[in-house]
Amino acid sequence: MSKGDALYDEERPYTELDNRYDKEKRRGYWELAKGLQRCDGLEVSQRAEKQAELYIEGTFSAQEAAGAIEGAYNAVGDVKGDRQAEADVVSLRIVSLLETGRFELSPSTLRMIHSRLFEGVFEDSRWAGEYRRVNLSKPEPVLGGRSVQYADFSQIKDTLEYDFGEEARRTRRYPLTEKDVDSIAQFISRVWQTHPFREGNTRTTAVFTELYLRSLGYEIDNEEFAQNSTFFRDALVRANFASFKNDINFDASFIKAFLRNVVLGEKNDISSMDLNIHGIRVNDIPYRSAGEYADRRPIAGKGPRSQPEESPSTRSDKRKSARLAASASPASLGAPKRD
């Protein structure tokens, strides 16, 4: 056998990878995807359940099941703006993404997930996979009707680049410690607070979180997400809200407890945790700019948090400082500008 023939050894042929996992794994993906719809007040239909069962049994791939349900809706009308169609189509698309499992720690992955989940679903087709171009607020029941202050739309790209850059600089090794998991919880909380998209931020963040943790070597407890998606969202809300007049601090203890259950198998009883802020009304909480939040943010608070948490403006200031330092370095002098 010549050297060239050895490179194409017929005795060691390539084997096609089988992405159709066992039934238990597939059912776990479906239950998670279904549960995530509830954090936006959605429930999947029996039609979607039937398609999912064909996927679980191995008759269809997740991609084929998603295509079939989308085709069924398109045959009778437009998917866009139909909330039931959104729940069904997005659920099966989540399964397809989880089954593939490909991941890279970058904002582009976040945009890819959002685009894959919501393309052709939103009434405005420009929303899928694109950063929002308006500022938003949303009344939260656990905050007595107040809204988290999301990142200014003009700073979304830079804020995400800063947060992802900080996370990439941290060394993650298997197995993760409690400190590692708490740090990841803070990172996920900041990504969600940025709220880069017009709709679908919580579902996108949840899928991103699962894929990230799996890339670190963990088989995730899908049941925790499936059964507690509303808690997951409310925990992110509480991690990103403070009212110093009313002695309410940013509290990441809830999202840390949730993620410890998911990753470390802890048995934190999240069902007994009260995330609601009591005894205040919307008008009792004065609006504060991001800068005021940063200036008055407490150094330490209740729960497992031990380090100060940064506000969006703090991250923005650090990002600008880093850019100024880079632009003043000898290596950057005379270098062409890049977008």
Image: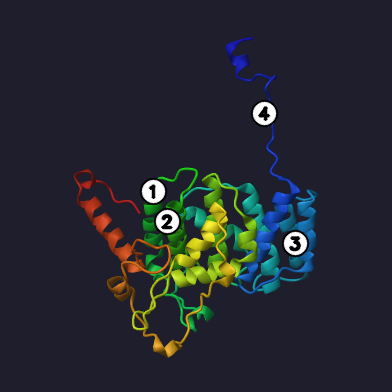
Residue at x 34%, y 83% (from the top left corner):
245
> Is residue 268 visible in the rendered structure shown here?
yes
**The quarter of the displayed image where residue 94 is located:** bottom right
Task: Look at the numbered discs 2 and 1 and tell me whether their residues touch, using CB distance below 8 Å.
Answer: yes
- Residue 332, position in %: x, y? 23, 46
- Residue 115, position in %: x, y? 57, 59
Marks 3 and 1, how far apart at CA: 41 Å
Q: Which residue is mark 2?
A: 183
- Residue 307, position in %: x, y? 34, 61
Marks 2 and 1, how far apart at CA: 9 Å
- Residue 30, position in %: x, y? 70, 58
Identify the disc placed on residue 14: 4
Q: Which residue is mark 3?
A: 69
Q: Which residue is mark 1?
A: 170
Marks 1 and 4, how far apart at CA: 36 Å
For mark 4, does the 10 Å Cα neighbourhood hold few (<14), some (14 to 19), or many (20 or more) residues?
Answer: few
- What is the secondary structure assignment of the residue under circle 3? helix
